[in-house]
Image: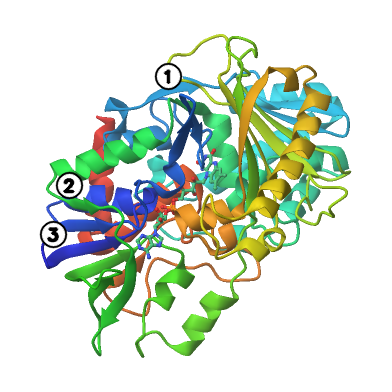
Amino acid sequence: MHNKYDVVIIGSGLGGLVCGYILSKNGYKVAVFEQGSQPGGCLQTFTRKGVKFETGVHYIGSMNEGQTLHLFFKYLSLFQNIKLYPLDPEGFDIISYNNEQYKYATGYENFIETLSQKFPSEYNNIKLYTRKIREIVLSSPFHSINNSDESFQFNSNYATTKVSDFVAQITSDKILQNVLVGLVPLYSGIKEKTPLYVHAFIKDSNISGAYRIMGGSDKIANSLVNSIRSFGGEIFLSSKVREIVCNSVEAKCIVLENGTHVEANYFISNTHPEITVNMIDSHLIRPIFRNRIYQMEQTVAYFTVYLKFKENKVPYMNHNFYHYSGDEVWNCENYTTDDWPRGYLYMHLCPEQFSRYAQTGEIITIMNFEEVAQWAGTKVEQRGEAYKEFKKRRAEKLLLQIEAQFPGTLAQVEDYYTSTPLTYLNYTGTIKGSAYGVLRNVNTPRIVHRTRIPNLFFTGQNTNSHGIMGVIIGSVITCSELIGREFLWEQIKNCRL
Ligand SMILES: Cc1cc2nc3c(=O)[nH]c(=O)nc-3n(C[C@H](O)[C@H](O)[C@H](O)COP(=O)(O)OP(=O)(O)OC[C@H]3O[C@@H](n4cnc5c(N)ncnc54)[C@H](O)[C@@H]3O)c2cc1C
């Protein structure tokens, strides 16, 4: 380890690694410091009895040749190391709601035709919905690579309009309104708060071309780590940053938990903004900014059951299954112990070699942090019997829900494992184990990549948007500060050639 770098990056989540890639590729001497023993943050996977489970990425969109995320993956040299498997184009997502199943099909025309079969009189409204979604995406130069030479300004109407109001303007059919926003867990939607753009970017990306990453999204992290090293950058695992030291005008160095000081000209924090400001004891962070960060709400947290199936027993399901038991897809976070879970996402993961049968499945549902708060401060695998019993009870409840929708599945489960909000708190450092960090709220300004300290920037899901696409775009915006937006954008667009 050197004691001075051009850029120090705190955290090796996707945001930290993409910044590391861009800057080291462009000649900056970069060092990434990660508190965990694995790189990747939410890209981490874990293996039990020979099978791998995802912890934070289950499918990605706009991955057809020429589409946005495909271009970014090309730029990041990811295709050398990962293989994708397309989800069913006739229904990559199924929304199970109101005792019916509704399919989202790939491609806008297909999407409109498929959904209209369930809502024949709503054909024009569904078309209008897709046109508006497309309009929003086209207004963002980063999401629609084509108009990138025009204004880089974000249309603030999309940040102040609620997605729930937007769909209510599109159609008076309440069921269709719910079906259109039915990916709530994917964007942590809150009816009274979630801005339209959050929904639009994710929905557009998935309709454009939804894929599973074969063999695990840790391959993305490992590929980026290898590239950064090949460009001369350095990654330090098990290296928690505890302090960012500033002089009277800017940040000067970080201090690791073991006391090591590392200086740099620039600092990029991929950690949650609350964690970042807690590392800084300087007048440069004004109390008003600090308080704003402390008062920000977090996205919901999840409880996940990871299923290991018996060999060659459960046919691979090539779509995601979103189920809601209430009369709305919203409000799954406002549950009682009796009506939990009010909704869940169930899917099968795609192993290295696609086969007819699934090896693993995952069921993800909301769990409020307060439910596990009593065990906060305990260590992984040492949280005690009551915690284990709590998880078992919840897992069994969730498994019964799967059995009701997919009869016979339980008998084919060889083993299962669970994670709670505490697991995420532990492995990614996110506040209260929240899945996607800071909640995007129509009433609250967004966290931007610039901070009050001129040479300290944020990156990752708490700025810009969450998800693979949102985080990569956010990293491009952060790195633009150092190397220039037009220059970087040209470099990325040149990958199309
Ligand atoms: C359950 C779940 C399912 C998801 N499914 C999808 C999906 O299907 N598709 C999709 O596109 N997206 C999905 N996402 C979202 C996506 O995974 C995230 O938005 C993205 O990976 C976040 O990346 P990040 O870099 O912002 O943060 P993180 O991945 O949280 O990384 C932050 C890193 O900072 C490190 N860190 C924290 N504090 C310190 C410190 N003091 N010192 C050093 N290091 C520190 C952490 O250990 C961590 O590695 C999902 C997320 C979750 C939780």
Q: Amino acid at mark 3?
A: Met
In the picture, which quadrant includes the C terminus? top left
Q: Is residue 434 above or below residue 87?
A: below
Which numbered disc, 1 or 2, marks the residue that appears first in the sequence? 2
Report helix, strand or loop for mark 2: helix
Residue 167 coordinates in the image, percent (x, y): 75, 47
- What residue does disc 1 label? 352
Circle 2 packing at 10 Å, graded few (<14), some (14-19), many (20+), is: some
Where is residue 459? Give x, y as percent. Answer: 38, 60
Q: Amino acid at mark 1?
A: Glu
Q: Position of residue 331 (x, y in %)?
A: 79, 53
**Alpha carbon distance from label 3 to label 1:** 35 Å
Image mark for residue 1: 3
> Residue beneath label 2, please?
25
Identify the disc placed on residue 223.
Answer: none
Residue 419 visible in this rendered orientation of the protein: yes
Q: Position of residue 78 (x, y in %)?
A: 31, 33
Camera-side mark, 3 or 1: 3
